[in-house]
Every structure is written in C-alpha cells, then in structure tokens.
Amino acid sequence: QVHLVESGGGLVQPGGSLRLSCAASGSIFGIITMGWYRQAPGKQRELGATITNGGLTNYADSVKGRFTISKDNAKSTVYLQMNSLKPEDTAVYYCYLNFGWGASVYRYWGQGTQVTVSS
C-alpha cells in the first residue's frame, strides 16, 4: 500500500517563504510524477508544480519564478520551495503521486497541508 506524508505548511506574511515536503512509501515503479495541486476556498483544485523521476518539471503560470520543485529519488521525496508568497497562494496543498506504465497506472493523494499567507 502506497502512503504519502506531507509537511511544511503554515502561516506566513506576504513576501515570506515556506518549504513543503512530501514523502512516499510503498511499492512505486515505472514512470513517476510527484508534486502538488492546491485548492483555495470555493475554487477547484488546480496544478501547482510537478516533477518526474527524470527531472522534467511543470509549473502553473501563477507560480513560475517564485516556486521551485525538486526531488530526492532515493528517498521518494519531493520538495516545494515557495518564495515571495502572496495572499492568493492561500490554499490547501495536496501532494500528488502518479506512477506505473502501460495499462497499470496508479494515482494517490496526500492528506493536504494548509498554507495561509496573510498579514
């Protein structure tokens, strides 16, 4: 059974920084994509940033230049460094894992961690 554990959320002032971590455990194989989607109150869940085991990254336009996603394949862990935070970044951030190959592809979600940017 695959399990995701998130950490690093909290309350920060505008312009501040946070670093999120997500660690995966269990049997993970094939092409692996990990990252975060976020959901603000009253809105749909949307892409934040993702990275593959090959190092390819994908960022939402709203976070480009401010957020950096990185990985440690040996630890099955991804990190999201969030700088220059804005109030509109306030959301629950859900760790995302997609892996497998061919017809055997699996998707998992973390429990979510709250990020609040406010004065």
Image (tube, helix red, strand yellow):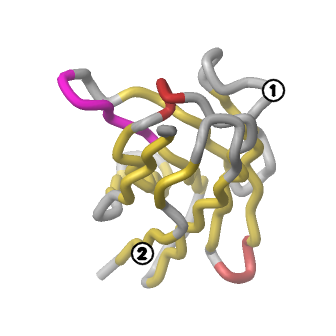
Disc 1 residue type? Gly
Going from N to C along the chain, the mark reached first, 2 or 1, is 2
**Which of the numbered marks, if any, corresponds to residue 7?**
none
Q: Residue at x 76, y 55 (%)?
A: 70
Q: Residue at x 59, y 61 (%)?
A: 20
Circle 2 residue: 5
Vertical arrangement, residue 16 with respect to residue 106, above or below = above
Vertical arrangement, residue 94 with respect to residue 15, above or below = below
For the residue pair 69 and 24, the one nearer the viewer reads as 69
Q: Position of residue 10 (x, y in %)?
A: 47, 60
Q: Residue lying farthest left?
A: 42
On screen, residue 88 versus residue 104, left or right, reads: right
- Disc 2 or disc 1, which is closer to the eye? 1
Query: Residue 39's image quarter?
Result: top left
- Residue 88 in magenta? no
Q: Residue lying farthest front?
A: 119
For the residue pair 48 and 10, the one nearer the viewer reads as 10
Q: Rounded to the nearest whole Å, what is the CA distance between mark 2 and mark 1?
A: 26 Å
Q: Where is residue 117 in the image (x, y as percent from the top left)?
A: 50, 40
- Residue 39 in magenta? yes
On screen, residue 79 versus residue 42, left or right, reads: right
Q: Residue at x 56, y 50 (%)?
A: 12
Instruction: Estimate how packed mark 2 is, as few (under 14), some (14 to 19) or many (20 or more) residues with alpha carbons within 10 Å.
Output: some
For the residue pair 95 and 83, the one nearer the viewer reads as 83
Circle 1 residue: 65
Q: Which span is picked out in magenta?
A: 37-42
Q: Which residue is drawn at 62% across and 75% down?
A: 76
- Counting labels gives 2
